Image (spheres, helix red, strand yellow):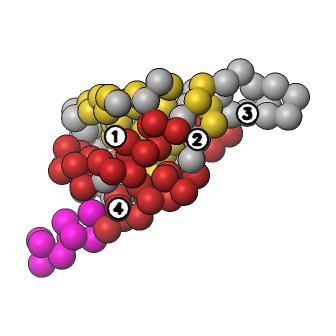
Amino acid sequence: MTLQIHDNPPTLTSEQALTGWHREFCVELLGEGQARIFLRALESASLKATELRQAILFHRVSAGFADLNGCVEAARGPLEQLASTAVRQLPGKDNLFAAVAYDRGAWDAVVNVVDAWQRRQHAAVR
């Protein structure tokens, strides 16, 4: 099982954050127990169907989210479960958009940990 962490968070200026830019926590399911985890900055929201074609799951995080390694460590169990259950597939008649089948419960668990991690970060700053 391999989790590839790309910890080079994109910089968001104060002006960008005020004009609607945001960050997303992303997991690209590579198959065979592998996943690439990264943050990205976007001006507009991602579309789930578009991202599933590339086997990318995403969750919006705050503009100040920066500790990807710490968050991944906190979510390691659910992330490994997610990666181990992911199967790459070709879109077909019954599945037009998703290039991957995955354990939605594991993804929900990852999202819960990411949300808790963000709250912990903000609580520590106060």
Give me the C-alpha separation between circle 4 and circle 1.
Answer: 15 Å
Q: Report helix, strand or loop for mark 2.
A: loop
> Which residue shows up at 24% across the image and 55% down it?
74
Q: Earlier in the sequence, mark 2 or mark 1?
A: 1
The 10 Å Cα crowd at callout 2, few under 14, some 14 to 19, many 20 or more, is many
Q: Which is more foreground, mark 4 or mark 1?
A: 4
> Which residue shows up at 71% across the image and 21% down it?
90
Q: Please, what is the three-letter code of the amino acid marked with disc 4?
A: Val
> Which residue shows up at 48% across the image and 31% down it?
29
Q: Which of marks 2 and 4 is nearer the N terminus?
A: 2
Seen from the viewer's position, the closer of residues 7 and 95 is 95
> Where in the figure is residue 35, as x and y percent of width and height?
40, 31
Give me the C-alpha separation between circle 3 and circle 4.
Answer: 27 Å
Q: Which of marks 4 and 1 is nearer the N terminus?
A: 1
Q: Which mark is residue 113?
A: 4
Vertical position of residue 125 compared to residue 18: above or below? below
Give me the C-alpha separation between circle 2 and circle 1.
Answer: 20 Å
Q: Main secondary structure of the magenta part?
A: helix
Q: Please, what is the three-letter code of the amino acid marked with disc 1?
A: Leu
User: Which residue position is annotated with label 2?
Assistant: 102
Vertical position of residue 119 compared to residue 16: above or below? below
- Boundaries of the magenta span: 117-126
Q: Which of marks 2 and 3 is nearer the N terminus?
A: 3
The 10 Å Cα crowd at callout 3, few under 14, some 14 to 19, many 20 or more, is some
Give me the C-alpha separation between circle 2 and circle 4.
Answer: 18 Å
The 10 Å Cα crowd at callout 4, few under 14, some 14 to 19, many 20 or more, is some
User: Which residue position is annotated with label 3?
Assistant: 97
Q: Which is more foreground, mark 1 or mark 3?
A: 3
Q: Identify the image quadrant of the N terminus.
A: top left
Confirm or deny contact between disc 2 and disc 3 (CB under 8 A).
no
Tell me, yes or no, if residue 69 can be seen here.
yes
